[in-house]
Amino acid sequence: MSGIRSVFVLNTGSSSVKFRVVNPESGAVSAEGLVERIGERIGEAGSDTPDHRVAIDRVLAGLDRGSIDAVGHRIVHGGDRFVEATLIDDEVERGIEQLAPLAPLHNPPGLLGIRAARAALPELPQVAVFDTAFHATMPAAARSYAIDAELAARHGIRRYGFHGTSYRIVSERAARFLNRPLGELRMIVLHLGNGASAAAISGGRSVDTSMGMTPLEGLVMGTRSGDIDPAVLLYLQRNAGTTVDELDELLNRRSGLLGLSGSRDMREVVGAADRGDAIARLAFDVYTHRLRHYIGAYLAVLGGADALIFTAGVGENSAAVRAAALEGLSGLGLELDAAANAQPNAQPGAQPNARPGAGARRISPAGARIPVLVVPTDEELQIARETAAVLTARDLRP
């Protein structure tokens, strides 16, 4: 038992603050919400929330501050330095700032949240939980790019992986659902949201993942291209005069489902494809082809699998994506029970983590060689738990 009653979990974006106050043991949520359009101009008067400090102060004004024992921050990139959840002090804050070039869209807003929360709640311990930390166990063969080694070392160029908090809690929930020790399981987990990635997990440890130095590599996503021949970028620079900033905009914000079909929303893509829209059908097929590509690759990396798991918004809710991702893979032991796959997720009742597997369900037929599961993720709860674990280890409990 950690003794931590509640953790104030913050996920800070460039113009938003998503928060939840959660008990790390029971999962009970006492408050949650989202503040948007921070610092943006709204009409002539400008935003009524000019910066993150004001946003967090307003959130705290509506909370019972006395019941909060700690603050947990989601930080996207920990580089080689931060390979586990870390108690924040001035040195850690500087370290996160130094890693900003590796995640220029994510680490600076996370740092704004840290500074605002430390100013507003100076009496509370605060912990940074890094998306990349879970993948620190990847072997050198999986994390290394085949470029000049000295250049790569000098600039920190390697594969880091992301969505680590999701992979950690989902793999643990899957093991509980299967009633097997996590340490003996080989899992392929597909975290499919607007950002999407796959991971090969052996014994609870990441051995490979589809995202790389940045969250751009790997699967097709809502607006990101995923894997692409790097020579395409050189070609566009040399022959179309495309600038570096324009390439960044193209690959991160105008590609993926949006670039292929005009919509980043999988629900809209599936609906249009079902109505006979050939462009939407191609987008769906490219997306699911890439999924099959990684499933096959990770079966090889793991030497087989004891479970394949779908999670996150698309993974948990799109029966069409799940069916297409596993189409033709029965020879590899992957099959779907069509009726089970079509069933919607159970409506949340009491705290879902109180049930074995936290709402997980099986969508493969009885007797299938590899169980296929849908397992809800909960990154905020995982951040709260890792925050509590850091405080317990340092004997900083209230």
Image: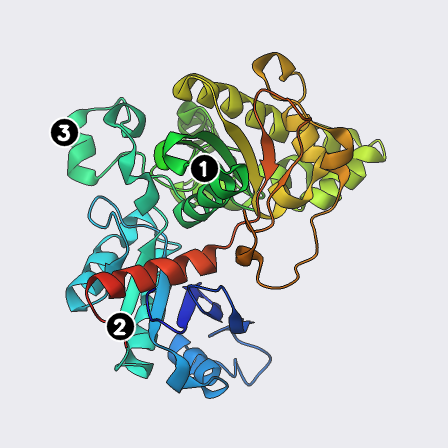
Task: Please tell me which residue lies in front, 17 or 305.
Answer: 305
Whether 299 is drawn above or below 251: the answer is above
Task: Please tell me which residue lies in front, 221 or 301.
Answer: 301
Expressed as whole percent of the image width and height from the top left, the position of residue 197 reads 48, 37
Query: In front: mark 3 or mark 1?
Result: 3
Residue of label 1 = 242
Label at residue 150: 3
Image point 38% across, 55% down: which residue?
106
Measured Cα–Cα span from mark 2 to mark 3: 44 Å
The reply to whether callout 2 and callout 1 are in contact (CB within 8 Å) is: no
Whether 240 is drawn above or below 246: the answer is above
In the picture, which quadrant includes the C terminus? bottom left
Expressed as whole percent of the image width and height from the top left, the position of residue 229 reads 44, 23
Image quadrant where residue 262 sits: top right
Q: Amino acid at mark 2?
A: Arg
Label at residue 397: 2
Note whether residue 10 is visible. Answer: yes
- What secondary structure is marked by label 3? helix
Image point 61% across, 31% down: which residue?
287
Q: Earlier in the sequence, mark 2 or mark 3?
A: 3
* Other-residue count near label 2 (Cα within 10 Å), few / some / many at <14 / 14–19 / ≥20: some
